[in-house]
Amino acid sequence: MKICVVGSGIAGLSVAARLAARGHAVHVYESAETPGGKLSSFFLNDFRFDRGPSLFTMPHLVDDLFRDCGEEASASFNYKKLAIHCAYFWNDKTQLRAYADEEQFTAEIKRQLKTDPQPVLDLLHRSEKLYQLTGRLFLERSLELKRFLDRDTFKALVRLPFYKLSKTLHEANSEMISHPKLQQYFNRFATYNGSDPYRAPAMLQIIPHFEHGIGAFFPTGGMYAITQAIVELAKRKGVVFHFASPVEEICVENQQAIGIKTKGERVLYDLIISNMDMTPTYRRLLPKQAAPEKLLRQEKSSSALIFYWGVRGSFPELHLHNIFFSDAYREEFQHLFAVDAQTAFPDPTVYINISSKEKPDDAPAGCENWFVMINVPNHDGRDWSNYVRDARENIIKKISARLNVSIAPLISAEYVWTPEGIETQTSSFRGSLYGNSSNSKYAAFLRHQNFSKTISGLYFCGGSVHPGGGIPLCLYSAKITADLIGEKYAV
Ligand SMILES: Cc1cc2nc3c(=O)[nH]c(=O)nc-3n(C[C@H](O)[C@H](O)[C@H](O)COP(=O)(O)OP(=O)(O)OC[C@H]3O[C@@H](n4cnc5c(N)ncnc54)[C@H](O)[C@@H]3O)c2cc1C
């Protein structure tokens, strides 16, 4: 089969490698000059930055990808398990390090928060059970009723009512944990798919297991090493890349995808896989086809505003991942999902990722590369300049007060990525980070399947379709799509 993949995000690259390894002739078309989409990298003076994702979980999915392509990942891609997942800071000077080791973590909770850590262990246990019950069910299967008619689904349907999943994530967390700072700690996991813990379902209690049960990792060469390794794997399997080649149209005849239009020319293919966000796939590449309006109208996950700062100095109290919590967490989420939130939230939760802590050559000697991110509303066509100016001021004030040092004069290089920039550079609808939000009870079913129901030969993979956004889910998405094609078409 001659297959075209539109976009070289992590899911596009992975599906291309998988299908080429099975003997298909695969071509990847990418608008940008380099691969990776959100998972790319850039230099700012002597500082290197990973552009988007910074937290690497479930690395075994990359190993599986290589193995399914007949190779061992370790020959070209390595990673290490982090001893401290993240350092948490509150405005009142409380600090908590989330150790990977359970004993160290519980000792830290006792020391810093002066509270019994047992409820935390209970919640993590529940998270693991939920993962065992539903993980494979929802993450590894194509979203079709016929795939769910088996014992595993039956077992889940019988047991899930005991987990009282009709509650919100916040309600479920606070039922198990009374310490407000630990409630906030567990509520934050909703942001791992861009959702609001005060509205998202308790099912998201599955997420802590990814980090605490399986682990948080760092790729030896930084996050971009994931993209580089999969691009090289795909090339070895025979994938042909066309960079700076935006796809302008998916050509359809008699409800069959027959090719694409790029640079004004039509190129014929047997199958098309869109790794572009599903909304612009329908609106821009398939404007004459009926779109699944109900799915397209779902609320989107939050977006982000990122300041990439080259910082003079080094900060031993900071780790690879750091969170500076807001004192007004509920209000912060109301702001993120309000349609008219035009002014920057005064006390935002600030995430700082410093890859030079693990990979010192990402910054010059005596300096650090700070990826400073706050969650913000989606791009709605606004001019972001006032929001950026105020957010920058709020962040600097908060970090300076907490670290007891004036940060502004230490910033020697700066680049800013707004929701508008995220949308323009990666085609993510409204700059949302993870496609549709998971703020509704039925969120898992409100994603586009990995195939088109109305156009044969058209498939989808990536963060805006099933099973969802984030690197691990994109890797699952690519596997589901490749397997669907493998089931239907011989090489
Ligand atoms: C700031 C930020 C922080 C994040 N943090 C994390 C994190 O810590 N951990 C985590 O797991 N996930 C994180 N994510 C989410 C994660 O990055 C995404 O879910 C994932 O990378 C999406 O991959 P994808 O395969 O859907 O493709 P994308 O990365 O969205 O790439 C799509 C590609 O398609 C190309 N394209 C679009 N339209 C066309 C066209 N018409 N023709 C040709 N090419 C086209 C684009 O140029 C792009 O390269 C973060 C995302 C962002 C933005």
Image (cartoon, rainbow, N blue to C red):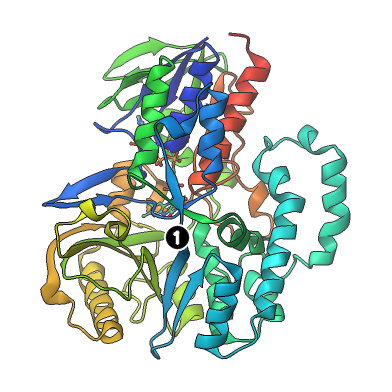
Q: How many marks?
A: 1
**Residue type (three-letter) at the residue carrying disc 1:** Ser
- Residue 313: quadrant of the picture: bottom left
- Locate residue 362 relative to residue 305 in the image: left or right: left
Q: Nearer the viewer, residue 434 or 486?
A: 486
Q: Position of residue 480 (x, y in %)?
A: 61, 32
Residue at mark 1: 302
**Picture layout, residue 184 above or below residue 286:** below
Residue for point 82% across, 51% down: 156
- Residue 177 vs residue 378, the one in the foreground: 177
Q: Residue at x 53, y 9 (%)?
A: 1
Please, is residue 489 above or below residue 336 in the view?
Answer: above
Q: Is 210 situated above or below 85?
A: above
Q: Is residue 138 left or right of residue 376?
A: right
Q: Quadrant of residue 307?
A: bottom left
Q: Picture coordinates of residue 284 (x, y %)? A: 39, 33
- Measured from the top left, where is residue 344 in percent x and y? 31, 74
The quadrant of the image that shows the C terminus is top right
> Which structural element holds mark 1?
loop
Q: Is residue 451 visible?
A: no
- Indicate the position of residue 60 as horizontal and vertical percent values: 55, 41
- The residue depicted at 24 percent of the width and 86 percent of the height is 404
Looking at the image, which is closer to me, 113 or 326?
113
**435 sits to left or right of 438:** left
Q: Residue at x 25, y 52 (%)?
A: 49
User: Ligand 1 quadrant?
Assistant: top left
- On the question of residue 329 being in view, the answer is yes
Q: Residues within 10 Å of mark 1 (few under 14, many from 20)?
A: many
Residue 348 or residue 457, whichever sits in front: 348
